[in-house]
Image (spheres, grey):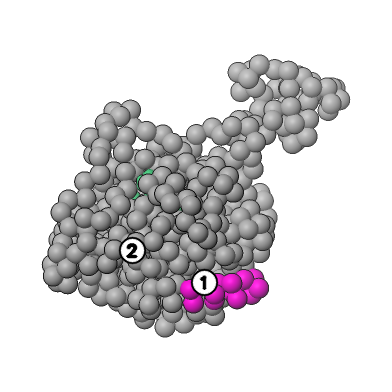
Amino acid sequence: MWKPPERIKYKPQPGPSPTAEEARSALLFSPVKLGPITLEQRTWVPAMVPWRSNEDGFVTDDVLDWYERFAKGQPGAIVIEATGIRDIPSGPLLRIGDDRFIPGLRELADTVRAASDGKTRLLIQVIDFLTIRRRPDPARYFSRFLVITDHHREKLGAFDWPEEQIRTHLAGLPDEDLDAVLTERELEALRVGYRERVTDLHLPHVRDLPQAMPDLFAQAARRAREAGIDGVELHYAHAYTMASFLSATNSRTDGYGGNRENRVRLPLEVFRHVRDVVGTDYCTGCRFLSDECIDGGSTVEDAVYYAVEFAGAGMDFLSLSRGGKFDDAKQPQIGWAAYPYTGRSGYECMPGYISDETGPFGRNVDPVARIKSAVNGSGFTTPLVVIGGIHGFQQAEALLREGRADIIGAARQSLADPDWYLKLRLGKGDQVRVCEYTNYCEGLDTKHKQVTCQLWDRLQLDEPGIKLSVDGRRRLVAPEWKEY
Ligand SMILES: Cc1cc2nc3c(=O)[nH]c(=O)nc-3n(C[C@H](O)[C@H](O)[C@H](O)COP(=O)(O)O)c2cc1C
Ligand code: SF4
């Protein structure tokens, strides 16, 4: 992952924890309404893909174990990882694109309800993404994938060459000479891997996204409801389809790109259709970006506009992330696909302990506070979730007391210690396993390996009955917290 050049090293700063009595009067542990549902407390475990599903996209025993472990810490809400709304193979990513996925998801909802003693509300993040291919071996790219066009013939002055000769010639050219012959997208396909964009209007399925997306999302939400999941989070963040519509880089010319009003059109149409299908009594919100953190991308000004639009349309919550784009992702190795958390915008999404003057803790706080003030100033009380480097009671409580956010989310801190909110609430904050923001977990995610935390994945490996990762070296869920 990209690291700020300043390379200033930060240690976690959780600060003092509350006593059990202080926790009882803390805003953090007070209820909050998300439209039709109420969270018992303002604590939130955001979506995290742990690579526990299978090639068929089903809820597996490992998926159940993963969420059961978080549920034992009784947070106000857990958001199930990004779950695909189409019925297409997506590697071991969870899917909700057909009714056959409902029974597994129902078991997951039942598991979380039982493990949290009914105290945790379960949401599911539903996602659509466009095609992305692995970075090809150059020889294969030139022999098989590249479509030879008149553009190449013209650049090479090779109108009468047979196609095979052009392919062989291109394969033999030094890398820098290719810049003059291949188009920008062909160079990208060669050096990074082919990637579709929402602006590819020449591709019929991309052109028709505004027709396809609303019902794909709505049917996914219906299935979530039928599975007994308490609500849906529409994934409008990071590098995926809906975020790409919101992006300032979206130059579609069909009324769904260009200015902000057009860019927010499809996300609003999707939401309205979801509402029509699941009703106003089903919790529906979205996750989007406070800032894309890329050159020419959407900024907090755009996010303010979107947030007011989403709140006005009747969303039940808004969860804010930042960054996480393909645009500045690192070049992957041959055979691997680009990953949107490897560049500067990826750093903004999951800031690590090696940082700049601002540091990794709470980089999203000021933008979210600004967005919240605009939402509230427009007369809406839609709760906002702030996420990013939050790992201590004092910081979390201050954000709520100062009215800078309504709900506190912590992904990696919850991974490091799934009981951390519970420990704080019981006055046992000294027992919290504090995240060090090393991004070891994210490194595993990037390699599509089962995600674990380095602070616990080698502990008590001889415990009877524990499951190990496929490499046999790591436990898959955090050890139980035994002290009460
Ligand atoms: C292993 C891992 C997987 C993630 N998967 C998702 C995901 O499925 N959807 C999503 O919106 N964000 C995902 N994120 C981002 C987190 O939800 C969160 O926004 C980010 O880690 C910053 O919060 P933190 O500082 O509390 O960890 C993931 C993060 C990690 C570490
Ligand atoms: S591996 Fe553990 S300590 Fe390191 S960033 Fe991830 S959750 Fe935090």
Helix, strand, or loop for circle 1? helix
| Residues shaded magenta | 98-111
Residue type, mark 1 in image = Leu
2 or 1: mark nearer the eye: 2
Answer whether residue 346 is visible to the viewer in this image.
no
Q: Which of these two is toward me, 193 or 26?
A: 26
Any magenta on residue 110? yes
Answer whether residue 74 is visible to the viewer in this image.
yes
Image x and y of residue 133, in percent: 64, 43
Q: Which of these two is toward me, 38 or 207?
A: 38
Q: Which of these two is toward me, 88 or 148?
A: 88
For the residues labelled 2 and 1, the Cα–Cα distance comes to 24 Å
- Vertical arrangement, residue 41 with respect to residue 385, above or below: below
- Vertical arrangement, residue 25 with respect to residue 338, above or below: below
Residue tagged by mark 1? 108
- Of helix, strand and loop, which mostly describes the magenta segment? helix
**Which mark, by number, is residue 149?**
none
Q: Is residue 399 left or right of residue 42?
A: left
Label 1 CB-ligand 1 distance < 8 A? no
Earlier in the chain: of badge 2 and badge 1, it is: 1
